Amino acid sequence: MTPEIEQRFDEAILRVLDRNPSQFGLGATTLQVQVMEFGFTVRDPAEVLRRLEYMADPRIGFVAEISRTANKAVRTWKITAAGTDDLRSRGF
């Protein structure tokens, strides 16, 4: 992906996470399906996971992984206040 497409992809992920009211967050596979609404066809949920891990980096902090005690194999993510602020600054 070019940097511009990565930025749009990250924005699509943030928009999906922003509209998720659940306290449990969303996993990479769910996000893989839901970003199709924004024109992205992702063949591998690992690609979504890479972007989530990038946005979770403390220098960026747009998403946070939700710790789950029941099943640690299932990784889920929520948008942070910084991620919400970033979306709002872009007009979403």
Image (cartoon, rainbow, N blue to C red):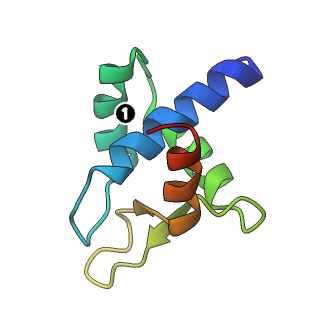
Residue 45 sits above or below residue 71 on the image: above
Quadrant location of residue 40?
Answer: top left
Rendering coords of residue 42 (x, y %): 44, 22
Residue 86 sits above or below residue 67 on the image: above
Left or right: residue 43 compared with residue 7: left
Quadrant location of the N terminus in the rendered image: top right
Rendering coords of residue 63 (x, y %): 53, 60
Left or right: residue 33 compared with residue 63: left
Quadrant location of residue 34?
Answer: top left
Q: Amino acid at mark 1?
A: Gln
85 or 51: which is nearer to us? 85
Q: Which residue is mark 1?
A: 32
Residue 57 sits above or below residue 1 on the image: below
Residue 17 sits above or below residue 77 on the image: above
Residue occupying image coordinates x 34% and y 42%: 16
Local packing at callout 1 (Cα closer than 10 Å; few below 14, some 14-19, many 20+) is many
38 or 53: which is nearer to us? 38
Left or right: residue 20 compared with residue 52: left
